[in-house]
Image (tube, grey):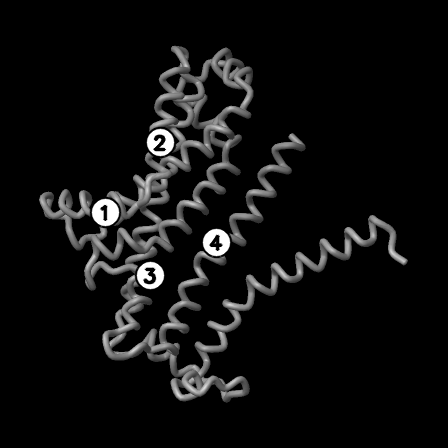
Amino acid sequence: MLDLKGRSLVIGHTLLALSVCFTLAPFLYILATSFKTEISIATGEILFDPTVANYKQVLFGRRSNFPHNLFNSVTVALISTAITLAIGLLAAYALERQKHSRLISRLFLGWTLVFHVMPTLTLVGPWYLIFQWLGLYNTLTAVTLIHIVLNLPLTVWLLMGFVRDVPAELEDAARIDGCTPFQVFWKVVCPLVAPGLIAAGVLAFVFSWNEFSVALTLAARASATVPIGIAQFAQQFEIQNGPMAAASMIAILPALILMIFGQRFVVRGLTSGALK
């Protein structure tokens, strides 16, 4: 007979296994669908002869625009992430280290939190009108700017916690040694908050990579990103299930690799900082 601790472990492992199964089941279904023909998908075959025709159609088909969608998504995600991290770190450092009343930082953080919790769809209409008036509609610039706006509040909140953990005495010691304010920020603060920058960068990249509603509204076919490219496989009279599944699997890879890569470096950065 199992004691109370043993039963708790069994229940915990069972719930964990069920959670993993529920998480992996849709992924495995899409993976299997990407290797099926349309006939196999329509008939619901479980045992089938795998084919890479869907991947060839997505990547090399004459009517496929998906490689261009990948390029657009990579461009938007990289640029928006870099700018978000630069602005977010400067804002977090200024808000955390400012010498005047903390009421200003609290009001600013409250405003960013309100903006962050607002549904994105409520702002898509005004953004559409603004970028049409500016002549930036259907450009990657418009999508990049909006992704910066959407990711900046979370980045500031996340980085403020890391800046707060940096002892102010280290900055004071650097100033005594003759460092300028920029040198203190660049050589003392930035290395110590590097794990936070990596974590915030991974989140900003993934959110930008997966964003759909803004890209659908502000970018037409020429500037469409990966989520829009996947949605275009569902046409008015036909849904191309195989190519859509193949495109989804290709779209998962960059974000998945970045998450694995970023997680490893976050753990390494935190442990090395603790040892030092």
Location of mark 2 (residue): 112
Location of mark 3 (residue): 227
| 19 over 115 or under it: above or below | below
Horizontal relation, residue 273 to residue 69: left or right:
right
Horizontal relation, residue 76 to residue 133: left or right:
right
Q: Position of residue 272 (x, y in %)?
A: 63, 36
Which of labels 1 and 3 is toward the front?
A: 1
| Disc 1 from disc 3: Cα separation | 17 Å
Q: Residue 137 has which mark? A: none
Q: Amino acid at mark 2?
A: Thr
Instruction: Give the class, few, some or many, for how many residues have Cα within 10 Å of label 4's Cα (few <14, many ≥20).
Output: some
Q: Position of residue 136 (x, y in %)?
A: 14, 48
Which of labels 4 and 1 is toward the front?
A: 1
Q: Amino acid at mark 3?
A: Pro
Q: Earlier in the sequence, mark 3 or mark 4?
A: 3
Which of labels 4 and 2 is toward the front?
A: 2
Considering depth in this image, is 59 or 17 the residue closer to the camera? 17
Location of mark 4 (residue): 258
For image coordinates 14% across by 42% down, the residue present is: 130
Among the 4 quarters of the image, the one containing residue 107: top left
Q: Amino acid at mark 1?
A: Val
Considering depth in this image, is 12 or 76 the residue closer to the camera? 12
The answer to the question of whether label 1 and label 2 lie on touching residues, with beta carbons closer than 8 A, is: no
The answer to the question of whether label 4 and label 2 lie on touching residues, with beta carbons closer than 8 A, is: no
Q: Position of residue 225 (x, y in %)?
A: 29, 59
Q: Earlier in the sequence, mark 4 or mark 1?
A: 1
| 211 over 68 or under it: above or below | above
| Disc 2 from disc 3: Cα separation | 26 Å
Q: Residue 124 has which mark? A: 1
